[in-house]
Amino acid sequence: MAAPETQLMLSIGLIEKDVNADTLWVWCYPSVSAELREVLLSKCCLTQDSQGLNTFVTFSVQEPSALKKVTHFSLVVTAKDFNPEKYAAFSRVLCRMYIKHGSPVKMVEGYIAVLTKGICQSDENGSFLIKDYDVRKAYLAGSVKDVVSQFGMETIILYTALMLKKRIVVHHPRIEALLEFTRALPALTWHRKDWSILHPYVHLADSELENLRTCTGYVAGFVDPQVSNRPDLFDVYVNLPDTEITVSQSAKEAMAMGKLHKDIGLVIVQSAEDADRTDGQVIKDISIKTREILANLASLAEDCENSKITLETLKQRHFPPATENFLFHLAAAEQLLKI
Amino acid sequence: MDEVDKILIHSLRQTGTDVGKDVQSVKHFTSELIVEAVVRCLRVIDPALGSGLCPSLPPGMSARFRVGMSLAQACQDLGYKGEIGYQTFLYSNEPEIRSLLMFLVEKLPRESAEASDQPAGKSALLQKSIAAQIKAQLALPWLSPSCRLPLLCKTQNPGPSHSFHSQTLSLPHCLKVPGKRQLKGKPQNTQDPQENDYHRDFLPPVTAQPSQHASVPASLLEQHAGELSAAQEWENEWNSQGLLSRLTPEEYRSRKRARLQKRIEEQLRTAAQTRPDTLGAHGSGSDLTELLQSFGGSPLIGDILAKGTRFTHTEKFTFTEEPEKAAKQMAAAANSLPSSHQSEEDLQARQQEELASLQQQLQQLSLSLEEVGGDMRQLTVSIHQVSDELKQKELSNTEEEDSVRVKKQTIYLLPDGENNLAKLQALVEGSAERVVNLAAQWEKHRAPLIDEHRRLKELCSNQAMESSRKLSEIKELHEKISQSAEEAKKKEGLYKQLITEFENLPKDISRSAYTARILEIVGNIRKQKEEITKILSDTKELQKEINSLTGKLDRTFAVTDELVFKDAKKDESVRKSYKYLAALHENCTQLIQTIEDTGTIMREIRDLEEQIETENGKKTVSNLEKILEDYKAIRQENSALAAKIREA
């Protein structure tokens, strides 16, 4: 029994758009809280696969089908982990079942089958197996090479921001581009393997922003260009269509960069430009460099009392000021700083 | 002809020509009268043309001649197509004069056209009378104050005019505040009693409110204009957008207010945050954020900004302290400034000391600044770290709790491993089946409810469409009603105005008689035209017959001639008959010729008779006599002038 994996799925739900142009949340299992329902309602409808902690698949209903009066419907799968391909495939299977039978009962059967056995019969050829979809593959599916090719040396800003657990906001008018781009960013800090900082599709609604504010560092994607007028929401603002990265005033001091960053930047750019290396290898190169820095920091920490670094210890080493600043903040991010 | 003459004389009288009461027709016009009439008409038609001409004939012959020529020229310039020269005026005859005068009278500008273009309505009349008054006043020449008559004093003094100062007035029935609509019937009951008392006992009347009496009309006008425009704008907005939104007026207004407030907030926020990040700006930024906080709608924004400003507040506070201290020290230093008996060196030394101490202080301040800055950074960073740790710990906590729970239960079941495993699987399958069952049952309940919901929604939207359609119909009807009401009002105003005008019009000419006669004449002409066409067609018919008969005759004669001539060579009697035939033919042709000639001559006689009549009317004989006399007079004048020249 693939117990730990299946427990990752929390619920599935169905949103329909009918002939009255009304969007309704018609069915869910086991249950979805009201606020979450609101949030998901605002995000669905004409959204294709979105990743992160939710997955939607939208289908438009063609005649003849068992569903009357429904023009489009969206299936929502909420889960704890980040594996868009797995959930997309699963959702497609469930959606086809729904279209064919017109009732969610079949979907529940499929869902429970996956929950209990990790496998689900699909009406098409073959079946859906959970173990086909490894989470590492999902992590690696984002293309770091594309990111580097778009931003060049400025990728180091993104790297620094991610390492220091800062708040990055990405804007692009099309959601697919947003999803593609943002899923690659957490790969720059491979040693943490933390994709929970990724919120690829956020609206400028109070409830969602409240949610964002409780996280210390995040990568948030917005389709709304108004977000550039909200410097309270980000430390780094990435304008994808114009390929611009801006650092907000309040974070400029923390994100000051020096020789160390230049080195890292060069490594990243060189590794990505090398046509023979795959995405995985590029990520590996970056993580090697990251590990060096962290090892350095850890050695510094060992010398101090309690294995915690203080600003004085850093000052004693007489690093150049940008590097010192960076190491100081990095220590805080890696929880090596004395409080 | 009488009627025509009467109309002409009437029009000439209107232009100012002094036509005597006994002159009833154009036949009796003298040369002087003709000249006067023509000149006055010209003056009315085209003042530039007529201004150079004098209405009275001068006594001298050559001068008369000249006047006649210039008048003729002027009339030709106007476009008179007939033959005209000095003789038309000096030696006139009736038909020419009549046609000239008719041409001129037709050229007179029509006053009636203007009146019909003017808009009706009381305000238009008021404006017209104001314009007329002002025109009249402007037409008066300006005289210096000492020469002015008292009447002119009033209008030409700068005294009555004031510059436009207006002040805000306070009225109890003030409609400027939206939402507090006060019905006209009960002005005071909807307000609170204190306000009522104030309005009743203390508020001075409107004419006493402005500080200067002269600004009362200006203030009243402005107040009224403001209220009027506000009311009109509200009307327009309500009729265009308010009705569509289907809210009550109060709801619509409150929604609009909330919308505007939100926009103002956003604008202020963006303005506050685009300021450069200097120390000085922090102070003003915090003022602005306090302002934003007071809007109340977004405590979050205030928190975020307050986080920053807490530190800036402390900064600001320390800085305000320092400048105060420094200022105090400066004051102390200033007090201890040298009086006049202290020496220069002491002065310099003292100044150096002060400089040194101030510099020290500066250094201290900057040190403390740095320290505080460093502390701040440290604290922010550690806050980040701690909150991060906290989150992570919480997450791992929940995970571990879950796993502990599962493991506890597994341990519990561990002893009897195999069995329990089988039991668990059976349990799982059973629950799965149950869940599916329940889902099916739920579906049975859910589907009809969803269908019902959809059906009702459809119904609702259909009704909404219906109601919006009806609303638009109602709006159209309203518009039509208002339009027709306006038109009716306008027409009534116009009618009243025209009635008064009609009553004021002079009754000396009866239009209806003229129009009746004109219509009669038109009918007559139509009948005559018909008769003429009939006669013409008859004539054509006759001519055709004549032609065909002549042709027939010729052909018959030709044939007969040939026939008889052939036989004439042989027979004597045939020759005789041939001669008789030829004679007959010739005589008949002569007859026909004579008849035709008679007809032509009769026509000529008629023409000549007509010409005689016209010539008779021209009073040529008397004109010739006059011409001879004038010729003699001109010769005399010429010789007199020549003599004068020889003498000089």
Image (tube, rainbow, N blue to C red):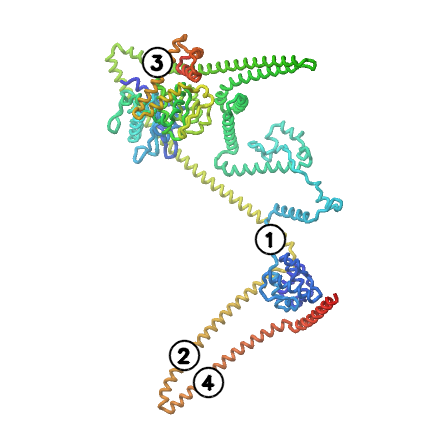
Q: Earlier in the sequence, mark 2 or mark 3?
A: 3
B59 left or right, relative to B568: right
Task: State the separation of the CA atoms marked 2 and 3.
Answer: 140 Å
Q: Say whether residue B180 is left or right of residue B543.
A: right
The answer to whether residue B358 is seen in the rendering is yes
**In the rendered image, residues at marks 2 and 1 fall on the same chain:** yes
**The residue positioned farthest toward the front in the image shown:** B345
Quadrant of res A107: top left
Query: SS at mark 2?
Result: helix
Which chain is home to disc 1? B
When asked about the image quadrant of residue B203, the answer is top right
**Secondary structure under badge 4?**
helix
Are tags 1 and 3 found on a single chain? Answer: yes
**What is the chain identity of the residue bearing mark 2?**
B
Give the number of the disc on residue B400.
3
**Residue positioned most to the right:** B146
Q: State the residue position of label 1.
A: B114
In depth, the one of A183 and B542 nearer the eye is A183
- How many angstroms separate mark 2 from mark 4 (CA)? 17 Å
Write down the chain letter for disc 3: B
- Report which residue position mark 4 lands on: B587
Q: In the rendered structure, the residue with mark 4 lies on which chain? A: B
